[in-house]
Amino acid sequence: MKSIHVILFVLAFTNTANAQNTNLDYSGALKIYNLTSYETYTTSVFTDTTNSNYHFSKHSALTVFHPTVAYQWKTTKSNFHEVELTGLMFANKRSQTVLMNDSTNINPTIGGMNTLTSELSLRYEYILTFNKMKESKFVPSVGFGLNPFYRRISNRPVLSNMYPSSERQFGVRAFITPRITYFVTQKFFLDLNIPLCFSEFNLTALRQDNPVIPVDHRTTSTINFYQFPKFLSARIGIGIKI
């Protein structure tokens, strides 16, 4: 009789230990986020036709509405991997400056630029999940992520006495991301998270196609490393289990 009690106790303990939050009972999910962000960054453009002088410009950008898409899949320990397409852009901008003279009606072009901008940004994150053994619609978690990105800006002046220039930048940002997930139904859930960027590494190459400058000196490269860069963001998304 005692052995039966022992067996029943072991079975009960085993079932309790193996109990899992049923909301986490899925293998993958598709997510659509809105990414709100604020960042500062720099761009450069050559302004001298014979020397390596260039303008160094600092920019700040606040983005309120930026849809992104991500895919998430579960590990054997009920944690998650997640991959997100955070940025994809291809834009062409043309500017032209004309000197107006009403008396002579001669309006020469004194400046202008054709600017081609392309950008690609991805994110990988490993998400450590809590509340695995407790039945709850609210599931806190923390993510550890890397965000590789590439940006290229190509400038072609409209004046013949100026030469094309370009800036290429490749970098990686590292994040820790506190998260809270709320499972609305067995199929849909909401995900609110705040990525905290604690480091950034980037390699920037600036090039001017000026025939006066030797070929070996037309490209200038710099390596930068920042701790806690000015990159703030927050995401809210809806997920569907698949």
Image: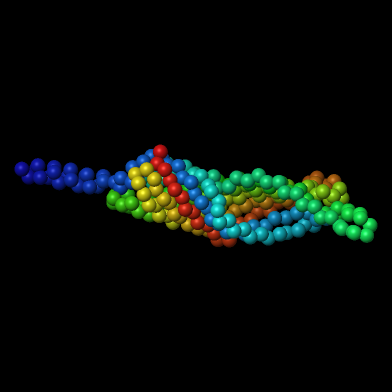
Q: How is the image coloured?
A: rainbow
Please determine whether, in this image, residue 21 is positioned above or below residue 198: above
Q: Nearer the viewer, residue 22 or 96?
A: 96
Residue 77, can we see it? no
Q: Quadrant of the N terminus?
A: top left
Residue 59 shown left or right of residue 193 in the figure: right
In the image, what residue occupies the spot 45% across and 55% down?
193
Q: Which residue is at the far right?
A: 104
Question: Where in the figure is residue 216, as x and y percent of width and height?
Answer: 78, 46
Residue 20, can we see it? yes
In the image, what residue occupies the spot 24% across and 47% down?
17
Q: Quadrant of the C terminus?
A: top left
Q: Which residue is at the far left?
A: 1
Question: Where in the figure is residue 219, as x and y percent of width and height?
Answer: 75, 49
Question: Where in the figure is residue 34, as x and y percent of width and height?
Answer: 51, 51
Q: Nearer the viewer, residue 140 or 50?
A: 140
Q: Nearer the viewer, residue 100 or 19?
A: 100
Residue 119 shown left or right of residue 71 in the figure: right
In the image, what residue occupies the spot 10% across and 45% down?
5
Question: Where in the figure is residue 91, as x and y percent of width and height?
Answer: 68, 46
Residue 211 shown left or right of residue 147 in the figure: right
In the image, what residue occupies the spot 45% across and 42% down?
30
The total of numbered circles placed on residues is 0
Residue 105 shown left or right of residue 190 in the figure: right
| Quadrant of the rendered image containing residue 73 | top left
Please determine whether, in this image, residue 221 is positioned above or below residue 71: below
